[in-house]
Amino acid sequence: MAETPTDGGVGDGRERTPSPRADVCVVGSGPAGALVAHRLAAANAAVVVLEAGPRFDFSRRLEQMEEHIRPGMGNPWEMGGPRDDYTTSGRHYPLNAARVKGVGGTTLHWQGMVMRLHERDFEMQSRHGVGTDWPLSYDDLKPHYREAEDAFGVAGALDNPYAPPREEPFPLPAFPPSHSDSIFAEACERLGIDMHSVPNARNSEPYDGRAACQGFGTCKPVCPSGAKYTAESHVRAAEKAGARVIDHAPVQRLEHDDSGDRIERAVYATPDGTEHEQEARRFVVACGGVENARLLLLSQSEAYPDGLANSSGAVGRYFMDHLFAGVGGRVERETRQNHVGFNTSESHQFYDDSDPVNGLKLEFLNYAGPSPVVEAMHAETWGDELRSQLRDSYGTHLAMGALVEQLPRAENRITLDQSRTDDHGNPVPHVEWSLDAQTKAALRRANEIQRRVFEELGATVDWTVGPEHTGPAFHQMGTTRMGTDPDSSVVDAEMRTHDLSNLWIVGSSVFPTGGAMNPTLTIGALSLRAAAAIESSL
């Protein structure tokens, strides 16, 4: 008699049936899930990770880069279709533009900037009377920030006078300022605007078995050299420590015991449509800012009719992102844009004293204007004519960006769209999102500062992204917020849910406020804090 396949129809021969014993089941293998899985596996816990997407073969990264730069090629990370369907209302939210389902999660194509939140970000209600306070302080998170920087291999320098206090250097030296940074520096010095280095989760020298940056310049969406950190590093480390990672295993729902106090199993599907049940003593949801909320809403029951762990009604609410403000144009000098695929200088000078109080982080971009490679591949000319065209269009561009804080509002939320289903018949996430007047005022302020710099440079402004044309930075936060009050929050300061004693949620969905700093370092720090609490509970 032929044996029944156990790979769920994937065809690669990998075992995808449940593990008979698990201390911890982690849902998701992005940076949050990978760090938790590694920490607990290293402590000898039996860990199973369920990942909705595939494993991406690192040996194909050069091909994926070509898929990105060649005209007419597909998405290198296989996003889209019924699996990733969603709907949106209010201001359009392009959810699939910058997320990845797969081992490593969205770190597979992130920009890689990693900075700590400022002290004020944890105390917005106390200091400014807006938003809410976190149930922990910057000092509480500071040791975990250091752990996260070591885990990611952050390259940085102690040259930022506005950064929150720290006692230790970065693991790696900072990348030097780019050529265009030096052009901006001339104008900023005259205007009294301070510039400083950007902490980056990419290797300025070899670190943790990964090469130093090779300068491909395609950091987002593909780093072919592996110099930029992805959560694959900690997935591999977790597996080496004994964890089991099951890919192509989207979790359909979590099921609890009769009392409604404990999760008993995660029900996951494989591509052939078979459903399996993974039991465990502890469960960790680490699916990202949208999918964390969606999974809880999909797991509604008689005990939790509005969604699992949702006695507060806060699951899905207080959805936040960072907004982009930018100005770009040209100067009559060589700028060498697109030689560096990431930011090397920024300014936090206007962060803590913003008026309005929304945080504001200035960025000096290194990828303004067309890439000569991409432009050449899309051109219809050849030879000397193409060379002349590239010379005229490339090399004199400049651009500044900014991230602007969006404060939490209950009406910005993730719900389930019952009228549309994914490839497993589940309602897709619906994003309700809009901008308030205060956020728009902060975007205008960012544009004002940026235009001052361009005027000082004598540059021609070709484009402006501001309040009416802004878009998200794709930092989805706030949908399972942490807090001390179970009536207004979903998890506590250790990321354990108020409603269920063996369920933790990690990732940016637990942020009560979002600040204006790229969130991944804080995701890492909070995940390590949660992992320590879970380890203590085992």
Image (spheres, rainbow, N blue to C red):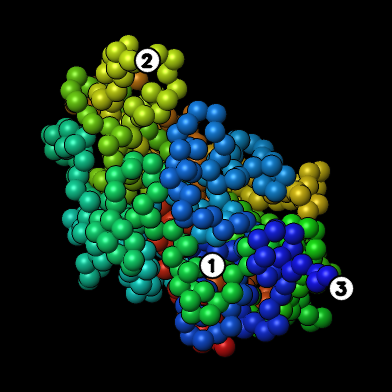
Q: Position of residue 193 (x, y in %)?
A: 20, 40
Question: Identity of the amino acid at label 1?
Answer: Gly
Residue 363 is left or right of residue 195, and the answer is: right
Quadrant in the picture for the C terminus: bottom right
Residue 365's label in the rendered image is none
Q: Residues within 10 Å of mark 1 (few under 14, many from 20)?
A: many
Mark 2 vs mark 1: which is more N-terminal? 1
Please report the residue visible at 80 percent of the width from the left and 71 percent of the height from the top. Answer: 3
Mark 1 vs mark 3: which is more N-terminal? 3
Question: Identity of the amino acid at label 3?
Answer: Met
Marks 2, 1: nearer the viewer: 2
Q: Which residue is mark 3?
A: 1
Kindly give the residue lying farthest to the front in the view shown. Answer: 1
Question: Identity of the amino acid at label 2?
Answer: Trp
Q: Which residue is mark 1?
A: 33
Q: Quadrant of residue 4?
A: bottom right
**Front residue of this view, candidates 223 and 423:** 223
Q: Position of residue 326 (x, y in %)?
A: 37, 33
Q: Position of residue 398 (x, y in %)?
A: 28, 29
Residue 382's label in the rendered image is 2
Q: Mark 2: which secondary structure? A: loop
* Whether residue 259 is situated above or below residue 446 in the rendered picture: below
Residue 184 is left or right of residue 296, and the answer is: left
For the image, the number of numbered tags is 3
Please report the residue visible at 60 percent of the width from the left and 45 percent of the height from the top. Answer: 78
Quadrant in the picture for the N terminus: bottom right
